[in-house]
Image (cartoon, rainbow, N blue to C red):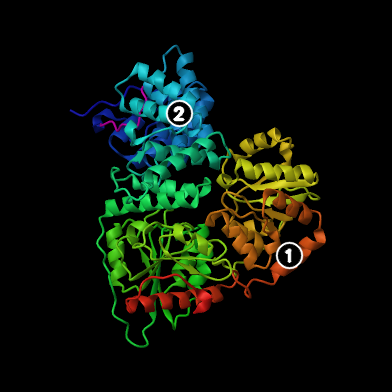
């Protein structure tokens, strides 16, 4: 017999309740009280009549707008239908009507955790615990786990360990309690973890997500998860765990490095942990890892990808093409969407000489509906949407299409570019743009495109690929994108008469050392303000706290919200001086500033990520903006800040470059790349080894 609908006082709890028509009110009920409406809506949900249930809830809430049970259960239905924003609104209304509604606060905390909204998750989870306590009920282990997870995402790792200990005392057998307690202990110990601890945590509520927002990685080891969570805090401007993150990277790199005179260790981690290793290889670029550590991590991540893919080379050699046949080149990317790499490469795709090359694009991410995605699809002769395909299937398609030169735009960034590349679907495979370190697998990528400033020849030993030196900073840029008239400073939230020092890099690139120097600049330039990009909702609060600690009025920090690309470029022209970050220079961000005629200062370091700023300034004829030390950086910045005539001369110089000078000349960059690709393909056809070369020598 079918189950009866729930009693009017019971919530639906997102569990469909089966009910026969005999147990339901009429399909179009007359005005009813809230209890009858709850019974009616429960019946429709039980029949899985989503359309009817939505209509019933709408009418019920029209008649009973202040009934919290209706709002709560409407939210449950909306969440089941995938309408999370609407569910959030429903549960917020419950909390307005009943501030101590524990279940509504808990639901809101879960939604906030899913999007890593740390302040909201923590506030709602605490409200749920407080509501239970105020009602005389002891908080249950599930609600405490929710609070513990929120504390972890917020970076309060010692507090999280204590919360999970409370949950453990209530229900030691619950898997999420045991998992949370183990994770809390690892994080509270600042990542001091070794493989002997045996901590492997599925943790789907925190595991890194795929770039298209899909399912989390199936597993992540504790140290990889520590790095993932710690980087989330750095993106928020929260530096509390940065020293531990640096130690974690050093520890992983040491574990990945072979002993002196030995061979690289074989993969021994469970399937799926390449996600954690690859994340470490990527994040290490931002955490002051040495070139040797970067190479060790990249090699370890690549070994694990090979271990999981178990690839067999699909193409070992190709016969020379018939005379007159165009060279078939392909770009492989998981970021064919609104993404910095796509902004950089988009114009080059369209500028390739169609009488010389046949251009393919394999996109591994789903369509995002953006104009940029559409432009990239239109720019190539053959677009192959491959989202959701197994890596082997994508590789087989590339091989079947007869691609001679495959250009990977991904490396160890999130996404399956490397998973495809290890199958060797093309005779020549090249790493370009997205990942500026070695990928650590000379069979997956035989060449790495760079320049002689970002990767000096004496750094070649830290790259497993053969280095190919392009001219003028090696980057591409879409110089054709329109820039509308700039807003007024007031419209952009800036003081009209201030000296605007712009640091638009993402929050995780702004380290304490970088911020120290920027604050010293503000002390030296009392008319200056620091204009920062608000990449994370918490970032303004954390950086203003840091500014106060350095003796700076927090109101001298102005945060720019995200805007569409054209509007962003228009406001960028309001800046007086661009300040580059140290641990990871601006790449696309710096190019944006130079394209918008903003003078810039950079300080190079010992890795490509720290030297691309220098390469780009040399490329545009502004080598005077390259500092040799933090003291020199301060001196150059103060000198430019106090010399408006010199800044104006630099603006006039930069205004002459688009369309005439690399990197703001996409046809010239496309022609240089074609020359490089032809040389690579020619050597491969002749069976010659993969060797470093310089484009200008061809």
Q: Residues within 10 Å of mark 1 (few under 14, many from 20)?
A: some
Name of the residue lying farthest toward the bottom: 323
Nearest the eye: 475 or 480: 475
User: Can residue 371 be seen in the rendering of this structure?
Assistant: no
Q: Nearer the viewer, residue 486 or 456?
A: 456
Query: Is 12 in the magenta?
Result: yes
Q: Of callouts 2 and 1, which one flags the residue occurring earlier in the amino acid sequence?
A: 2
Is residue 24 at all visible to an observer of this figure?
yes
Q: Which residues are magenta?
A: 10-18
Res 452 label: none
Does residue 488 lie above or below 684 as drawn?
above
Instruction: Give the structural element (helix, strand or loop) at label 1.
Output: helix
Identify the residue at horizontal 52%, vertical 48% (top origin): 286
In terms of secondary structure, where does tag 2 sit? loop
Picture quadrant of residue 180:
top left
Image disc number at residue 651: 1
The percent position of residue 447, horizontal first and vertical second, equals 42, 66
Image quarter (top left, top right, bottom left or bottom right) of the N terminus: top left
**From the viewer's perspective, is residue 12 above or below residue 318?**
above
Q: Residue at x 56, y 43 (%)?
A: 536
What is the spatial separation of the Cα atoms under label 2 and label 1, in whole angstroms?
Answer: 50 Å
Q: Which residue is mark 2?
A: 189
């Amino acid at each position: 017999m079918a189950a009866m609908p729930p009693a009017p006082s019971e919530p639906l709890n997102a569990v469909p309740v089966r009910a026969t028509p005999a147990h339901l009110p009429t399909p179009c009920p007359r005005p009813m009280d809230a209890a009858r409406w709850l019974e009616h809506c429960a019946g429709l949900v039980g029949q899985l009549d989503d359309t009817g249930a939505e209509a019933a809830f709408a009418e019920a809430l029209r008649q009973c707008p202040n009934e919290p049970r209706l709002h709560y259960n409407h939210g449950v239905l909306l969440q089941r239908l995938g309408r999370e924003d609407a569910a959030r609104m429903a549960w917020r209304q419950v909390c307005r009507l009943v501030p101590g509604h524990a279940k509504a606060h808990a639901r809101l905390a879960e939604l906030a955790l899913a999007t890593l909204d740390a302040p909201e998750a923590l506030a709602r989870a605490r409200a749920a615990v407080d509501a239970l306590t105020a009602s005389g009920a002891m908080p249950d282990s599930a609600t405490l786990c929710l609070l513990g997870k929120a504390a972890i995402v917020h970076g309060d790792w010692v507090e999280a360990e204590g919360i999970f200990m409370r949950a453990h005392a209530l229900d030691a057998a619950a898997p999420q309690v045991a998992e949370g307690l183990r994770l809390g202990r690892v994080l509270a110990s600042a990542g001091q973890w070794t493989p002997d601890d045996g901590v492997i945590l599925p943790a789907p509520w925190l595991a890194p997500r795929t770039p298209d927002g899909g399912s989390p990685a199936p597993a992540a080891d504790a140290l990889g998860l520590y790095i993932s969570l710690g980087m989330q805090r750095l993106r928020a401007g929260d530096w509390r765990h940065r020293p531990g993150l640096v130690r974690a990277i050093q520890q992983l790199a040491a574990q990945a490095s072979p002993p002196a005179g030995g061979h690289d260790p074989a993969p021994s981690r469970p399937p799926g942990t390449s996600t954690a290793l690859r994340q470490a290889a990527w994040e290490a670029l931002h955490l002051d890892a040495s070139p040797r550590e970067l190479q060790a991590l990249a090699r370890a991540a690549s070994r694990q990808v090979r271990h999981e893919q178990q690839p067999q080379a699909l193409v070992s050699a190709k016969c020379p093409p018939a005379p007159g046949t165009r060279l078939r080149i392909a770009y492989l990317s998981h970021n064919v969407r609104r993404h910095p790499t796509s902004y950089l490469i988009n114009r080059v795709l369209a500028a390739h000489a169609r009488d010389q090359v046949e251009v393919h694009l394999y996109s591994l991410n789903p369509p995002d509906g953006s104009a940029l995605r559409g432009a990239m699809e239109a720019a190539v002769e053959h677009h192959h949407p491959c989202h959701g395909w197994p890596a082997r299937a994508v590789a087989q398609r590339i091989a079947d299409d007869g691609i001679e030169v495959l250009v990977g735009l991904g490396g160890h960034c999130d996404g399956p570019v490397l998973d495809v590349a290890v199958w060797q679907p093309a005779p020549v495979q090249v790493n370009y743009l997205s990942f500026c370190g070695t990928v650590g697998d000379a069979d997956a990528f035989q060449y790495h495109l760079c320049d002689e400033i970002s990767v000096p020849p004496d750094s070649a030993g830290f790259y497993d690929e053969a280095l190919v030196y392009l001219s003028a900073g090696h980057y591409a840029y879409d110089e054709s994108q329109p820039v509308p008239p700039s807003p007024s400073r007031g419209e952009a939230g800036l003081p009209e008469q201030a000296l605007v020092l712009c640091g638009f890099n993402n929050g995780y690139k702004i380290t304490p050392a970088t911020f120290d120097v920027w604050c010293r600049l503000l002390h030296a330039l009392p008319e200056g303000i620091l204009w920062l990009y608000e990449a994370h909702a918490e970032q303004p609060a954390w950086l203003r706290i840091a500014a106060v600690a350095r003796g700076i009025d927090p109101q001298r920090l102005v945060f720019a919200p995200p805007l569409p690309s054209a509007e962003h470029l228009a406001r960028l022209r309001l800046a007086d001086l661009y300040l580059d970050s140290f641990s990871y220079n601006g790449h696309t961000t710096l190019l944006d500033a130079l394209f918008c005629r903003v003078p810039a200062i950079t300080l190079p370091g010992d890795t490509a990520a720290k030297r691309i700023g220098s390469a780009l300034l040399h490329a545009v004829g502004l080598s005077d903006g390259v500092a040799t030390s933090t003291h020199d950086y301060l001196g150059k910045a103060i000198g430019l800040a106090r010399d408006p005539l010199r800044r104006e001369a630099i603006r006039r110089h930069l205004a002459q470059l688009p369309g005439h000078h690399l990197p703001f000349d996409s046809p010239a960059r496309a022609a240089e790349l074609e020359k490089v690709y032809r040389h690579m393909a020619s050597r491969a056809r002749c069976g010659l080894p993969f060797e470093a070369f310089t484009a200008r020598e061809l």
